[in-house]
Amino acid sequence: MKLIFTTKGTDWDSPMDPRFGRTEFFFVYDEETSAVETYDNRAIEGEAHGAGPKTAQKLAEFGAQILITGNGPGGNAATVLQTTGTEVHVGAGDMTVKEAYEAYQNGTLKKMQGA
Amino acid sequence: MKIAIASGKGGTGKTTLSTNLATFMAESANVVLTDLDVEEPNSGLFVQGELLHSEPKNKMIPHWEKENCSLCGNCQKVCNFNAILKMGDSIMVFPELCHGCYACCELCPTESLPMQPKQMGELKHFRAGDLDFVESRLMISEEQAVPLIKQTIDYVDANFPADTFKIFDAPPGTSCPVIEATKDADLVLLITEPTPFGLHDLKLAVETVRQLGKPFGVVLNRHGIGDDKVPAYCAAEGIPLVACIPNSRKIAETYAAGQLLYRDIPEVKAAVETVAAFIRDHNGGESS
């Protein structure tokens, strides 16, 4: 399974970014190969409108099945994520990436319905 | 003549001044009051009248027709608002983000994005005694006030002659909706309160109207609370402090009951008379 986290940094101890559309980084973890990949999304700050769908479009390029984030995407971004069938798990905004992954494995994150 | 009543800070008395001034001036002139705070119009709470006309207001958004689309992605490249995205083999349109600029539609090589109307709000035109009153109301979930404000001003322009006193109750703040509501005005009245917040946001509003190159004056509401820094600022900047409306419990009670103030409260009447005279001075002394 390939997971994607919204984060404020590029390693396992980085804090999660609770925001979806304006997240600073993506942290992508492939469970099969243990490979980690990160993406710097900070250019999104320059977008006055539509950060959510734009970030969701970028996310789709990584082909992750699971999104782990904080507050969860808004309506427009959720619509984009629906087209890719990405599963959205929210409530990890105050954790580190590592804690968020553990919480996901323990099933303590909330799965967003309809996304 | 167009008069915009704006404020910077919200809740300083734009609607109080607009409704009282418009109703007062309508006793002796042709006046139309227009509520341009389309996200939360409230002049209508104080000005009730007979509904003369209402019409839906639309914005134009692209509609994807996939038959001839080559999925070139040009539409998402030219959109400044991320309102249209290519996802796999489909094009997604986000109507709330769309500013109706037509760029994607015009620049689509296969003409696969014709524009279609989508209702964003409703305009209503009332007659309240001697006063015409127009208000527009943005629909729930619509994010953009500017297109509706523009169409509302167009309606007023088309339906009232130029010598009508057109009073615009503007939205608060200093962002796009306020610019749209004030950029065609012949005169701007900035209303504020004598508090640090009131002064801070007045300065932003002054900066805005100066950039627009508009003649303007300040009206001070809730005079008697706070401090004297607003009058001092106006004096130092050479800004006319046109009138003061006192802070009073009677005003608050009358306002809370949804009633106009100037008929019952002499200080308010004096203030609106002074403001009306200031407006007429800026109209070359002509009255319509």
Image (spheres, rainbow, N blue to C red):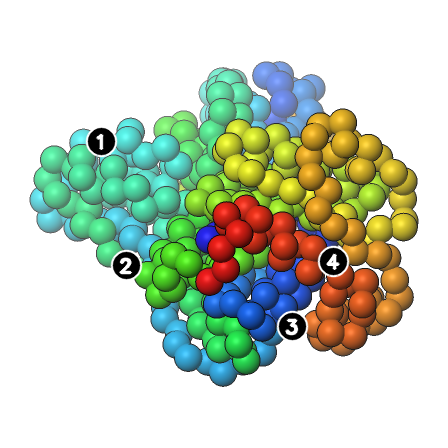
Mark 4 or mark 1, which is nearer the start of the sequence?
A: 1
For label 2, the residue is B117
Q: Amino acid at mark 1?
A: Asn
- Secondary structure of the residue carrying tag 3 is loop
- Quick check: B29 left or right of B117? right
In space, the residues marked 1 and 4 are separated at their CA atoms by: 56 Å
Q: Chain of mark 4?
A: B
In space, the residues marked 3 and 1 are separated at their CA atoms by: 49 Å
Q: Residues within 10 Å of mark 3 (few under 14, many from 20)?
A: some
Q: Are marks 1 and 4 on the same chain?
A: yes
For label 3, the residue is B46
For label 4, the residue is B271
Q: Position of residue B281 (x, y in %)?
A: 57, 48
Q: Amino acid at mark 2?
A: Pro
- Secondary structure of the residue carrying tag 1 is helix
User: B253 above or below B232?
Assistant: below
One can see residue B286 in this view = yes
In this view, the mark in front (4 or 3)? 4
Q: Amino acid at mark 3?
A: Phe
In this view, the mark in front (3 or 2)? 3
- Quick check: B103 left or right of A111? left
Q: Chain of mark 3?
A: B
In space, the residues marked 4 and 3 are separated at their CA atoms by: 18 Å
Mark 2 or mark 3, which is nearer the start of the sequence?
A: 3
Residue at (54%, 46%) from the top-left corner?
B282
Mark 2 or mark 1, which is nearer the start of the sequence?
A: 1
Task: Point out which mark residue B74 bears.
Answer: 1
